[in-house]
Amino acid sequence: MATSTKPPSGTRDFLPDEIRRRQYVIDVVRRVYERYGFEPLETPAFENIETLLGKYGEEGNKLIFKILRRGEHEASGVADLALRYDLTVPLARVVAEYQSELPKFFKRYQIQPVWRADRPAKGRFREFFQCDIDSIGSTSPMVEVEQLSAVSEILTTLGFADFTIQLNHRALLRAMLEAAGIPDALHGEALVAIDKLDKIGRDGVIKELTTRGLDPAAAEVCLAAVSGAAAFDTTVAGHESAKGPRAEIERILALVEPTAASGHVSFVPRLARGLSYYTGAIMEISVPDLAGSLGGGGRYDNLVGMFLGRDVPACGFSLGLERIIVVMTERGMFPAHVADRHADVMVTVWNDGSRADALALAGELRRAGLRVDVYPDADKLGKQMKYASDRKLPFVTIVGDDERAGGTVSVKDMSSGAQLNMPRDEVAPFIRTRTSGTPGTPGTFGTSGTSET
């Protein structure tokens, strides 16, 4: 029986065009994050298992990929390591480990893969990249606002116009659960169920709440409360614990007005976010016709304290690279040049005796900053041209007997078919001026001095 060549379920191989699209998005994310003052950080792919367990709630613990002890201990079936579930808990560990080396207000970005033993679905994978920003050391709402602005700028730059960033507060949700008469011991389970409202609908949430031991009447109160801002405010009216966080939501909504997030942020009472480490404001990006979100985050002022022994204010936001790419691909949002960024020019090989000269020309063009492909065989010129055309290469150079004798190079524009003969030292600047800014997009020649081949 032949061995399957497919990657494991929930993972993917990325071919060149796919990598170019991914890199385009990552480059936009990185540039914006750095403009907002976030610094880069990387952590190992796996952590000590005790670092991760107990940080994500019951649901999260089930999705952690555990690594069995190795060598002579393998037969024990005991796991001592685990693949990284997210980038937030490793950050909390880093803050605790390097507290004396980090600034008072530490702002970091991290773009790395994470792994979850989830059921694969459209836009949901077992291995996927997260693009995180986190701010450590301040309780100011300016932190949330800066993060909302950064992710809004990223989405706008990528071409999204119809996104909404939902905003809520965990303390408000707790006040709502108290108003519904739900015991403290069931708060976590109730929030996990409510967080699935967009995925499983009202009836599904009611069923899950009652299955988890909640009184059906209390479940109905919760669902009514999260139906809208007015209903929510009515439900928590009179609860002293709701006044502070509700005012904080209003401060954040007011502060986003002069930022890139203006018009994109809304108070949404049904937003719960199931991770147990959130303590304050929570945020999530939604776009029409997408089951799930493009990213989210929130304040987690107690998480670092699990490692450090004292609480440190913290807030973060994570963009889901995979879902962003899925939506952009389905909507045709990638610029035309992104998938065609192969090389700027291909150097042809006239005959066996010209191989060394072809390599020399390629070296000259590369030193000038161009991306250069060299055709490896001395095939007929038509066959070489077809290869360049199939790969959508914008320019091709030809050094035949006449060009070699005259010290020139013929450059062919593969888009227009025009061909221009020029001195060898003019080739690189000529191609560079026609490919800079939009790699893979050829320029056009003038009519003077052109010939067709």
Image (cartoon, rainbow, N blue to C red):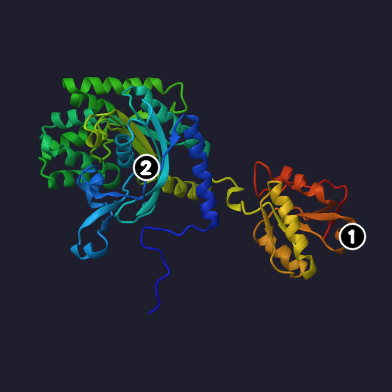
Give the secondary structure at mark 1.
helix
161, 141: nearer the viewer: 141
Vertical position of residue 190 compared to residue 229: above or below: below
Residue at horizontal 30%, vertical 43%? 198
Q: Position of residue 395 (x, y in %)?
A: 73, 54
For residue 316, what is the image quadrant?
top left
Look at mark 1 in the image and give the residue it sits on.
405
Q: Secondary structure at mark 2?
A: loop
- On the image, the x and y values in percent for residue 319 come to 40, 40
The residue drawn where x is 23% and y is 40% is 194
**What percent of the width, then of the height, locates residue 73?**
22, 62
Please indicate, yes or no, whether residue 159 appears anywhere in the rendered image. no
Q: How far apart are the alpha carbons under marks 1 and 2? A: 62 Å
Amino acid type, label 2: Ser
Q: Which mark is residue 206?
A: none
Percent coordinates x, y for residue 410 in the rendering: 82, 55
The circle on residue 293 is 2
Q: Which quadrant of the figure contains the N terminus? A: bottom left
Crowdedness of circle 2 by 10 Å Cα count: few (<14), some, many (20+)?
Answer: some
Q: Nearer the viewer, residue 147 or 49?
A: 49
